[in-house]
Amino acid sequence: MKGKKIGVISLGCDKNRVDTEKMLAFVKGEHDLVSSLDEAQVVIINTCAFLESSRREAIEEILSVIDLKQNGVLEKIIVTGCLPQKFIDDIFSELPEVDAFMGVSDYANILSVIDRIYSGERVNAVGVPRGECGKKRVLTTDNYAYLKVADGCSNHCTYCLIPFIRGAYRSVPMDDLICEAKNLGEVTELILVAQDTARYGFDLTPKTDLVELIERLSALDNVKSIRLMYCYPENVTDRLIEQLKTNDKLIKYIDMPLQHADDKVLKLMNRKGTGQGYLELIERLKREVDGIAIRSTFIAGFPRETDEAFNNLVEFIKKAKLFNAGFFKYSKEEGTAAARLDGQVPTSVKTSRWKKLYSVQKAVVKENLKQFIGKTVRVLAEGFDGDELVYYGRAYFNAPDVDGKVYFFSADEVEYGKYLDVKIIKATGYDLYGERL
């Protein structure tokens, strides 16, 4: 069967986005990809299930698409990704309107699944987590692309469902990644992602590491720059720091998920570091890599997080002066070790602490951004804000979606996807404002 109109909804993280793009590569050519659900005959929803809030979002999205199906707008629904991978036994019977379910490593089967549901079969095609499903993708981003260098996780942090959903850490063979990167065409910014990007290669035969991958990607003419996300601090090696210092294609930016800074809480989380060790690593990166922007994420309200432990985290945020940080309220996930701990923190306390962390970091960001006022910043132009009547883009310290933007006035028309110089006039919140030179 060919020629169906396919619409896709991709939920969750950038790693999920890569999975969606690989699935679209199988669909393209056999079926027609449409941007509006109103045009679609088949809707594929690629889901996230990392937190209770993400599962709720996925279910709400599925229910809204079911409404479209019941109203005759579309014909078939396929749900893929983390939600069916972990919860297929529950949702297969609870969502009878869904025609097929596929897991996190089943995207190569999408064409056969479409054939099966149009033959009248209701399909459970959820398999076990395994290797990546291909090297070709249909990009859904402009000016940048993600490269997922590994799937799964073997760290077993006590709060995290990822090992239960996506299995053990599996590095993608380096030659496959190089081939995939070449197939992307010209990429202004290639963003390396995984559950623990810096761990790349330890499980391959022969063993390799992230530095070798960065060097090979840097040699590709179509890759103009490289950004690192999700590098666990214990795997930020001397060699990786040297790359950040000396490799002109490697953006002076690193995202390191720290999650906490109190030693007792870190131990309960099964994290490998200490608050002091994290501070020393941050100070070293700032000292050795001129102008580096460091980003991180933290969890508020972890079980047994006392007032003292929380205050230790607050003081850490003040001392670390991270360029940016994201904060999450602890989510009690059934099946994880943390969910079985006594001393669960009340929701109201978690919310209060979460707000406090954002408040503290906002003051840090304000100081960080002040340094750019009156200076010229190189900006990758990405779009136009019709409400503010200004263009916007990203500087090296802005990763897509998670960091701020640089807004700027320009008397001349701006070509998106190109770098230009912007003189910064002011800083507001997480964003900078300026004028194109």
Image: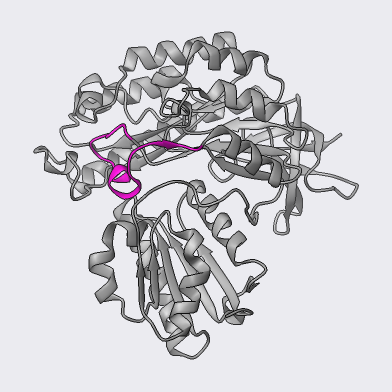
Percent position (x, y) of residue 63? 38, 75
Task: Give x and y (percent) for residue 218.
Answer: 69, 27
Identify which residue is drawn at 81% across, 41% down: 418
Q: Residue furthest bottom?
A: 72
Quadrant where the N terminus is found in the figure: bottom right
- Quarter of the image with the C terminus in it: top right
Residue 71: image x %, image y %? 46, 90
Is residue 342 rendered to the left or right of residue 119? left
**Is residue 252 in sight in this rendering?**
no
As drawn, is 64 to the left or to the right of 160?
A: right
Q: Range of the magenta residues? A: 154-172
Instruction: State the residue at coordinates (53%, 70%).
Output: 111
Q: Please name whichever residue, 430 or 16, is drawn nearer the observer in this view of the structure.
A: 16
Overall secondary structure of the magenta section: loop
Q: Is residue 323 magenta?
A: no
Name which quarter of the figure residue 170 lies in: top left
Near-viewer residue (108 or 80): 108
For residue 336, side relative to residue 407 (left or right)? left
Q: Does residue 356 lie above or below 207 as drawn?
A: below
Q: Most extreme residue toward the left, as rendered?
A: 342
